Image (tube, helix red, strand yellow):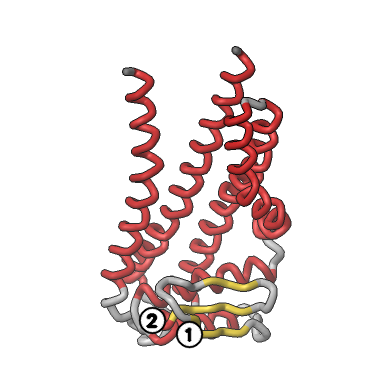
Amino acid sequence: MAGMGGFLIYFAILLILPLWAQSKVKRAYKKHSKIQNSSMMTGAQVARKILDENGLFDVKIEEVRGVMSDHYDPRSKTVRLSTDNYHGQSQAASAIAAHEVGHAIQDAEEYAFLRFRHAIVPVANLGSNLSYILIIAGAIMYSANLLLTGIVFMSAAVLFQLVTLPVEYNASSRAMDQLVSTGVIRNNEYRETKKVLNAAALTYVAAAITALLELLRFVLLFVGMNEE
């Protein structure tokens, strides 16, 4: 019964934690997308202003389809903002635009964690694709070697999740500094704008915790297999 209870708690964490984080960021985004920023600048204008203030005139800004599909593409040096954030003048739009520009600034300054994350992308992708296949095969065939190989591949994917945390938090910190220093937001908007970025950061924290728990489960399985 104790083992079953532990499994249910583990399963609940894996299921509930990501959903909770996603719901929190959606609530924060929905609330602050209805509040206009004091500068009345669109997300695209905010991004362009911060980029220019930092001398990143070569970084482009493009509109992209989807909801909260915003990202920075280091290969083409492009900040891509979802339609609502590209055209929106809300606190949420300015916060997210500034966050993505934060990644562009990291790229220009060769921020160590960002460079490291880019370097391990191929290995992390391979780990995500192969790890479960190897782990399942190892469990079915009762092969400790296959299971261990799968764990090693999964570790690369987990490492990517962990390295993502300082990258995202640093981009958010840069975003808030830039929003204030460029005059996009006033001091009384700081706290509310930061709530959007803090909520978004929780999704990365939840993803990292979930990945670690999954890895731990298979490590314990491997240890148990070797003890028998």
**N-term mark: 2 or 1:** 1
Distance from disc 2 to disc 1, alpha carbons, whole Å, reads 10 Å
Q: Is residue 86 above or below residue 110?
A: below
Q: Residue 86, percent across and down?
A: 44, 83
Q: Nearer the viewer, residue 80 or 136?
A: 136
Nearer the observer, 133 or 103: 133
Amino acid type indicated by mark 1: Ala
Q: Is residue 211 left or right of residue 110?
A: left
Q: Residue at x 47, y 72 (%)?
A: 69
* Residue 188 visible, this orientation: no
Choose top left, top right, bottom left or bottom right for residue 52: bottom right
Secondary structure of residue under mark 1 = helix
Q: Residues within 10 Å of mark 1 (few under 14, many from 20)?
A: many
Amino acid under disc 2: Asp
**If the image is split into quadrants, where does the N terminus sit?**
top left
Location of residue 6 with respect to 49 vertically, above or below: above
Find residue 119 and report its horizontal and vertical position in percent.
73, 57
Residue 144 seen in this snapshot = yes
Mark 2 vs mark 1: in front: 2
Residue 25 % position (x, y): 35, 61
Q: Which mark is residue 44?
A: 1
Q: Which residue is mark 2?
A: 84
Question: Who's the residue at 50% across and 84% down the image?
Answer: 63
Whether label 2 touches label 1, CB < 8 Å: no
Q: Position of residue 110 (x, y in %)?
A: 71, 64
Q: Which mark is residue 69?
A: none
